[in-house]
Image (spheres, grey):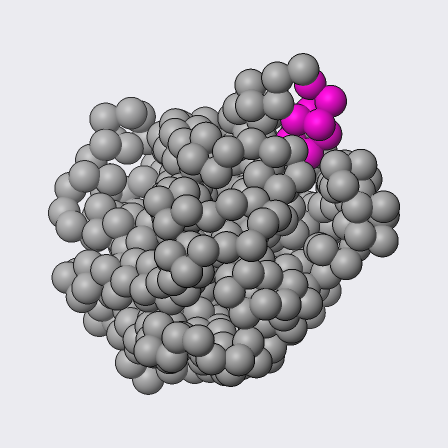
């Protein structure tokens, strides 16, 4: 196989492809947002499990599951290439498995004699199935195009879809569940509808996108090569730690929002209002982030976006006891920064894919894309667990009037926890070695290799 764009398509994507790519990312983010934002609430207030028990589940199961992500990336990179591409067929299969396991996660605890055991099993299965959908989806971005501006456009679409989808889902979930009858039955019906919609969107994406950039070398990397790619130098470990911290911040923010607005701000309706308020700034950030990266480079653009998000959480932390509507402004500022950071996250991974191939000779889209899945899971587990442990430590009592200590804990959990995790991720990324100059050098070197490979293939020389 050659690392050259497919004939007649020199690295560029069409409008129809970008729309299909949007559909796939929407199908990915909807179920994961429901789990990240509402699973804790469903299991505590709906099923009746203790917050500490759910926190342990979120942490341990997510970390175990996250540890399998590099394995899944390796497997996907080594699955047989088909006439439809290296990733699209497996994206379709993975979406069906993920849809079934997502529905089971909300149905099984309400039906099983031991809800805690049921949710442990369902959560672990969901993580593995989600991997088989998420890793091929993330691997598509560097495989669809090798044009930096086009990659930035796709990253903006991905970030915009994730943020808009997360905001819209957060706003719609509780009203939708109540409209379906509420209680565990309402959650179960809602989960089935989400699962079906996600699978349909993924089918649209798999059918509508194209894979243009293929490995230069026919030889595929082995386990030792994978270890060398991940552990040689600082780039992969530092980006991984930063991504875990940022994912944990997002998970903590989303997991705490229903509790914060219901009990601290005094209005559950503000959960939907906060999600709606964040959508506009998130969309603006996802558009502005790639533009900012064009001036500062993706790494510095990412750091600037994260700093804005930290400022938003600081406004919440520094104003205890304010009316609930006041805090919406802090969430809007945090959303603006998060929008840029999420979009640029995928540009950084695409750049790292090129730099890794330049240095090692192996192209490993799925293995490196598994970093995003690993970070989302590990960060989600850490952020969700820290939120649950904070609720338990401060004395939160499900469905009852909260003590002053519990209310104070909710305020700090909603502000200092995500803000501190974001700050940690930014500090780690300051040491990240892949800057714009290195990325450009890598792309230029790969372009020369592709040209040489194409010339050799045309001349019939090895």
Residue 391 appears in view: yes
- Please state if 389 lies on the left or on the right of 200 as rendered: left
For image coordinates 21% across by 52% down, the residue present is 238
Nearer to the camera, 151 or 202: 202
The stretch drawn in magenta includes residue 219: no
The stretch drawn in magenta includes residue 107: yes
For image coordinates 58% across by 49% down, the residue present is 400
Residue 46 on image: x %, y %: 66, 39
Nearer to the camera, 232 or 428: 428
For image coordinates 27% across by 42% down, the residue present is 361
Q: Which quadrant is home to the C terminus?
A: top left
The image quadrant of residue 370 is: top left
Residue 298, above or below 196? below
Residue 313 on image: x %, y %: 38, 72
Residue 200 on image: x %, y %: 78, 45
Residue 11 appears in view: no
User: Which residue range is magenta in the image?
Assistant: 105-112
Nearer to the camera, 157 or 102: 102
Q: What's the magenta bit mostly, secondary-structure-wise?
A: helix
């Amino acid at each position: 196989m050659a690392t050259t764009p497919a004939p007649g398509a020199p690295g560029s994507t069409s409008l129809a492809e970008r729309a299909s790519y949007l559909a796939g990312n929407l199908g990915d983010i909807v179920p994961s947002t429901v789990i990240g934002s509402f699973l804790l609430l469903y299991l505590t207030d709906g099923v009746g499990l203790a917050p500490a028990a759910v926190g342990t589940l979120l942490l341990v199961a997510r970390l175990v599951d996250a540890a399998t992500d590099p394995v899944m990336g390796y497997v996907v990179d080594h699955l047989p290439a088909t006439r439809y591409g290296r990733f699209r067929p497996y994206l379709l299969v993975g979406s069906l498995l993920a849809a079934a396991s997502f529905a089971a996660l909300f149905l099984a605890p309400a039906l099983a004699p031991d809800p805690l055991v049921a949710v442990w099993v369902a959560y672990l299965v969901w993580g593995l199935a989600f991997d088989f959908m998420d890793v091929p989806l993330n691997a598509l971005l560097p495989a669809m195009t090798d044009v930096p501006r086009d990659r930035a456009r796709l990253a903006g679409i991905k970030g915009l879809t994730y943020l808009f989808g997360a905001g819209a889902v957060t706003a719609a979930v509780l009203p939708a569940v109540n409209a379906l009858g509420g209680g565990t039955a309402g959650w179960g019906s809602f989960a089935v509808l989400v699962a079906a919609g996600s699978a349909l969107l993924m089918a649209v994406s798999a059918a509508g996108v194209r894979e243009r950039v293929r490995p230069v070398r026919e030889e595929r990397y082995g386990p030792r090569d994978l270890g060398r790619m991940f552990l040689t130098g600082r780039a992969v470990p530092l980006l991984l730690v930063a991504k875990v911290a940022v994912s944990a911040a997002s998970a903590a923010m989303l997991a705490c929002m229903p509790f914060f607005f219901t009990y601290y701000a005094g209005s559950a309706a503000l959960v939907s209002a906060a999600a709606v308020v964040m959508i506009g700034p998130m969309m603006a950030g996802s558009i502005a982030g790639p533009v900012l990266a064009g001036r500062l480079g993706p790494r510095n653009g990412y750091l600037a976006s994260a700093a804005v998000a930290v400022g938003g959480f600081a406004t919440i932390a520094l104003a205890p006891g304010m009316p609930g509507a006041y805090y919406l402004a802090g969430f809007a500022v945090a959303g603006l920064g998060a929008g840029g950071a999420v979009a640029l996250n995928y540009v950084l991974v695409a750049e790292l894919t090129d730099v890794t191939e330049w240095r090692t000779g192996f192209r490993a889209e799925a293995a490196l894309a598994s970093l995003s899945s690993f970070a989302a899971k590990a960060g989600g587990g850490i952020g969700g667990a820290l939120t649950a442990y904070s609720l338990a430590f401060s004395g939160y009592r499900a469905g009852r009037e909260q003590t002053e200590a519990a209310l104070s804990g909710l305020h700090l959990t909603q502000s200092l926890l995500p803000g501190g995790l974001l700050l940690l991720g930014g500090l780690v990324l300051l040491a990240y070695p892949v800057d714009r100059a290195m990325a450009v050098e890598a792309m230029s070197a790969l372009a020369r290799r592709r040209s040489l490979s194409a010339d050799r293939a045309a001349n019939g020389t090895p």
